[in-house]
Image (cartoon, coloured by chain):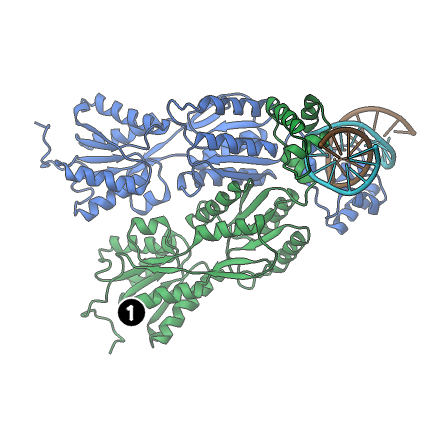
Chain colours: A blue, B green, C brown, D cyan
DNA sequence: TTGTACGCGTTATCAT
DNA sequence: ATGATAACGCGTACAA
């Protein structure tokens, strides 16, 4: 590992001169000197220490992302968006899984702060009435005071700018799709209890049902965000007939779990029952699931871009989503034996 | 941001003393002094600069992972394994997508080297006869000379230790499963051309078929590693009857693509044709796909552990895999009209 | 047991 | 146009 002083020595110039040439300063340098420095750097395979650089700068060129779980496609798409932008801008991505624990978020934020990250992205949803939120908010404030940018990709009260999707509208719109297909009794498999995103999605669902005069037909059942939750919830639904006209799941993976339970029970989708999810992850495409497409990649890239060259501020940007009808939803069969339709 | 000097000043001691108590040195310190330093640190919310620390250490506490694409579950599971271990050990994970490009691997390795990473993990497969490999190998060697540990999670000639799976055996074993079910004509949808993993898996497949005296019945068709590839390859298979008894896909996602093409064509799985994949990612479980389970999480965590506290060396550890039969494979129907069985 | 002083590699400031 | 030097924050060898 050759350092700047060695390059300077080989080139026969002062370190400051070498620095100016190698760091792309606009300081005037004679062509001859520049060439010598460049040659020396080349010869020594010089590569500047990002550590030393960060020491004398307001921050490093590290971009942090806090995800609930990178092994969840929702977050891996976001991470991909972040990294693409970061890499193109000469930065490096730091990643941490926080498993939806606010205390973990705090400690990981601190860890990234210790490296003087250029910024930290909060990709996951927060909890409703989380007693730890004040502590997190305080840690975030401190980080910001120190010059670390922060961005949220979910509705959270953290102070920085945020790039989000309107989860109420997302659920509202997909529910609308179901309702407009003639479905009346629709079951909603909820997300993990206590999470803001779960709450919003349920509100959106309920809201559209109420507007359609179907408040009585709306059925919310506890679920989660994974396959098992969808499978189990559907089994419970199956155990208490009559079957709803449609099932709306809190996300795609839950919907796939529902689909699988339905298939095992020998119930035809969408002939006997419609199923829809939200997020539009790859799995949704694989199984032909009707869902709502979210600009996840864009959220990640926008967040990274903000950190790298954005202006300060705390504006919230609501990105648009799109219902994508596929093969798991269809018009409600006219002869369905659904009570309450009298 | 309070630094060590401020803590020392508040505590009324020298920086070296503060450093010793705060950095957990084994240097003897009087209980009284220790308490005062701790109190001062607490009061000032002191958190050591990881940057400055790394400057005076042989390396930072950053663990790098180079993946082909984090939005590919294969790699996100590995990344999860890496991060869990890294976090528990007080390190932070750096992640970079390299899109299977060796030149990108080189430049990302360099970027992580600039941060004096404790180590860098190469998670992806290499290419056969890759002209860039020497350059990468050289970069890796230099990194190692500098004290950066490197680990491979695929068979590559990079010099460090590696934690791998025997892809020939993986393909051999799942082919064995198919053959033992009575299948004779089996089509193999290959992985991306030129990748080592593709080659090994094909070899394993061909090897088991040959041993079963089924060399003539083995059919290799070009594919890839994604859904589209599996779908398209299966369509091509469908266009040229007779249908094989079974389809083995280079990985799970390809198998799902095949499954979907088969379903659209109205061909029953596993009644009319068996389908199997490799990797055992979550999708495989969702669709009940027969596949081979790989210790991906373990590979990631072992790699991280090696970087953090492993011994030097270049040993190759071959981890075991396991065929997991599910619902997409079944015994070959006795009355199948497969020619060549005469 | 505690303190002093140096070095890590870079950029910026202030001479020259 | 170039050079010398301070500063970033920490750990540590050496001195007391």
Residue B142 vs A37, above or below: the answer is below
Is residue A2 shown left or right of residue B128?
A: right
Q: Residue at x 56, y 64 (%)?
A: B129
* Residue underneath mark 1: B180
Q: Secondary structure at mark 1?
A: helix
Give whichever of A181, A162 is nearer the camera. A162
Is residue A203 shown left or right of residue B72?
A: left
Q: Residue at x 29, y 44 (%)?
A: A288
Q: Residue at x 37, y 44 (%)?
A: A282
Chain bearing tag 1 is: B
Give whichever of B50, B232 is nearer the camera. B50
Residue A258 vs A110, above or below: the answer is below
Mark 1 neighbour class, 10 Å CA radius: few under 14, some 14 to 19, many 20 or more: few
Q: Position of residue B60 (x, y in %)?
A: 63, 42
Instruction: Confirm whether residue B309 shows in the render.
Output: yes
Give whichever of B161, A54 is nearer the camera. B161
């Amino acid at each position: 590992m050759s350092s700047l002083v060695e390059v300077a020595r080989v080139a026969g110039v002062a370190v400051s001169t070498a620095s100016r040439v190698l760091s792309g300063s606009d300081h005037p340098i004679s062509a001859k000197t520049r060439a010598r420095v460049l040659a020396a750097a080349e010869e020594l395979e010089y590569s500047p220490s990002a550590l030393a650089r960060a020491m004398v700068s307001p921050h490093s060129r590290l971009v942090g992302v806090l995800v609930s779980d990178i092994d969840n496609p929702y977050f891996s798409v976001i991470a991909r968006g972040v990294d693409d932008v970061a890499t193109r801008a000469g930065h490096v991505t730091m990643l941490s899984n926080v498993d939806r624990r606010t205390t973990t978020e705090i400690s990981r934020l601190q860890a990234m702060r210790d490296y003087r990250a250029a910024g930290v992205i909060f990709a996951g949803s927060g909890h409703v009435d989380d007693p730890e939120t004040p502590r997190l908010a305080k840690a975030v404030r401190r980080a910001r005071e120190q010059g670390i940018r922060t961005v949220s990709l979910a509705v959270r009260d953290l102070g920085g700018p945020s790039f989000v999707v309107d989860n109420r509208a997302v659920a509202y719109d997909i529910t609308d799709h179901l309702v407009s297909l003639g479905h009346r009794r629709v079951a909603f498999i909820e997300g993990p209890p206590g999470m803001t995103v779960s709450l919003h999605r349920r509100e959106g669902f309920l809201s559209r049902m109420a507007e359609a005069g179907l408040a009585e037909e709306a059925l919310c059942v506890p679920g989660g965000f994974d396959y098992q939750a969808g499978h189990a919830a559907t089994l419970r639904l199956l155990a208490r007939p009559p079957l709803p006209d449609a099932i709306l799941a809190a996300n795609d993976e839950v919907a796939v779990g529902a689909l699988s339970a339905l298939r095992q029970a020998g119930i035809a989708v969408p002939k006997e029952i419609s199923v829809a999810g939200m997020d539009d992850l790859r799995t949704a495409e694989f199984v032909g699931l009707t869902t709502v497409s979210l600009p996840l990649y864009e959220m990640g890239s926008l967040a990274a871009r903000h950190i790298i060259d954005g202006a300060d501020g705390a504006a919230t940007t609501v990105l648009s989503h799109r219902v994508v009808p596929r093969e798991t939803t269809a018009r409600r069969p006219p002869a369905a034996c659904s009570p309450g339709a009298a």
